[in-house]
Amino acid sequence: NSRRTRIYEGKAKILYEGPEPGTIIVHFKDDATAFNAQKKAVIEGKGVLNQRISEFIFTRLNELGIPTHFLRSLNMREQLVREVEIVPLEVVVRNVAAGSLAKRLGIDEGTQLPRSIIEFYYKNDQLGDPMVSEEHITAFNWASPQEIDDMMHMAIRINDFMSGLFLGIGIKLVDFKIEFGRLYENDMMRIVLADEISPDSCRLWDIKTQDKLDKDRFRRDMGGLVEAYQEVARRLGIIAEGEKPER
Ligand code: C5P
C-alpha cells in the first residue's frame, strides 16, 4: 500500500487519498492514547474492532437519514469516506455523570443526569482540547450559529438512536464524543457526521454488572480492552460467538 498518498496521520488513524476525487481512505490503527497522548500503547486488534463497530453504527445512521461521511468499508481496518472539512470541535453528549464532568462538578460517577447534556470542546492538542461555549465558537468563527444548531440536533438524534441500540443489548450509553465535517457538494455545503463512533469514543457500561466496555479500561489500567470491545461487537451481532476477529 506504499503507492497510496498519505494525507495525515493522527493518534489512532491514518488518512490516505481515496480512489476518486472527494474521497478519503481511513485506516484504523491499533494505537491507543489517553490524557492528550501522554499515555500510549499498541493494543493488537483494537483498530479492526473500532472499524467494524463504527461501520455498523454509521451504516445505521445513514439508513436513518442522519448524514455521515461514511461510504463503505474496504477491508477489516479501512473505510472509504467522503472528504470533508473537519469542524474543529469535539461534541460530547452525556446521559450519566462520568469522566471529566463528574470530576469538574463533583458529581458521583454513575449519577443519572436530569437530561442529556451537550458540551463542545475546541480541538487543539497543544491546549488539551479546552471546553468552550457557543459564544466562543461563534466569536472565533469555528462554526456558525446555524451549524451549531445542526450539530446539536444531529447529536440528539444520534444519542436517541445509540441509547436505544445499546439498551437493547444490555449496555448503558453513558456518554460519547462525535465530530462533524462540512461536505461541499454541487455548490452546497452541509454538516455531516465524520470521524468514528466506537468504544474508543464512548462510555459503555454493562447494565447487569456495571463492567466498563470502553476505553476507560485503558485510561484506568484495567486490562481486558480487546475482550471488552469484542463483547460489544458480539452483542451488536458484528462478530459471531467465539469468533476472533481478523487482525
Ligand atoms: O473525558 P470526558 O469525560 O470529557 O469524555 C467524555 C466522552 O468523550 C467519553 O466517552 C470519552 O471517551 C470521549 N472523548 C473522546 N475523545 C476525547 C475526549 C473525550 O472520545 N479527546
Image (spheres, rainbow, N blue to C red):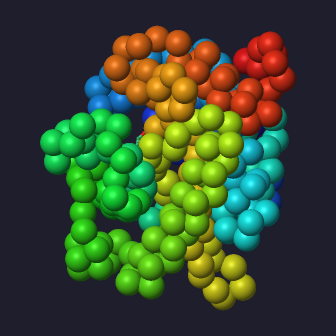
Vertical order, 149 against 31 (above or below): below
**Which residue corresponds to the image point at 46% horizontal and 38% vertical from the top-left?**
203
Point 67% across, 68% down: residue: 66
Toward which corner of the image does residue 104 lie, by quadrant? top left
Q: Is residue 67 visible?
A: yes
User: x%, y% of residue 188?
Assistant: 64, 86
Query: How many badges with numbers are in the image?
Result: 0
Toward the viewer: 215 or 138?
Answer: 215
Spot occupied by residue 219 in the image (x, y as percentages of width and height): 36, 24
Q: Is residue 235 above or below residue 94?
A: above
Q: Looking at the image, which is closer to me, 82 or 108? A: 108
Residue 134 point in image, percent of width and height? 28, 74
Ligand 1, seen in the image, is in the quarter at: top left
The C terminus lies in quadrant: top right
- The residue located at (69%, 53%) in the rendering is 58
Quarter of the image where the N terminus is located = top right
Left or right placement of residue 203 versus residue 163 in this view: left
Image coordinates of residue 83 in percent, x first then y, are 64, 62
Q: To which quarter of the image does residue 71 belong?
A: bottom right
Judge left or right: residue 129 versus residue 2.
left
Q: Using the rendered image of the protein, determine whether residue 18 is visible from the camera's viewpoint.
A: no
| Residue closest to the far front | 208
Relative to 232, residue 161 above or below: below
Tell me if residue 82 comes above or below residue 235 in the rendering. Answer: below
| Direction bottom: furthest residue | 187
Q: Residue at x 25, y 68 (%)?
A: 133
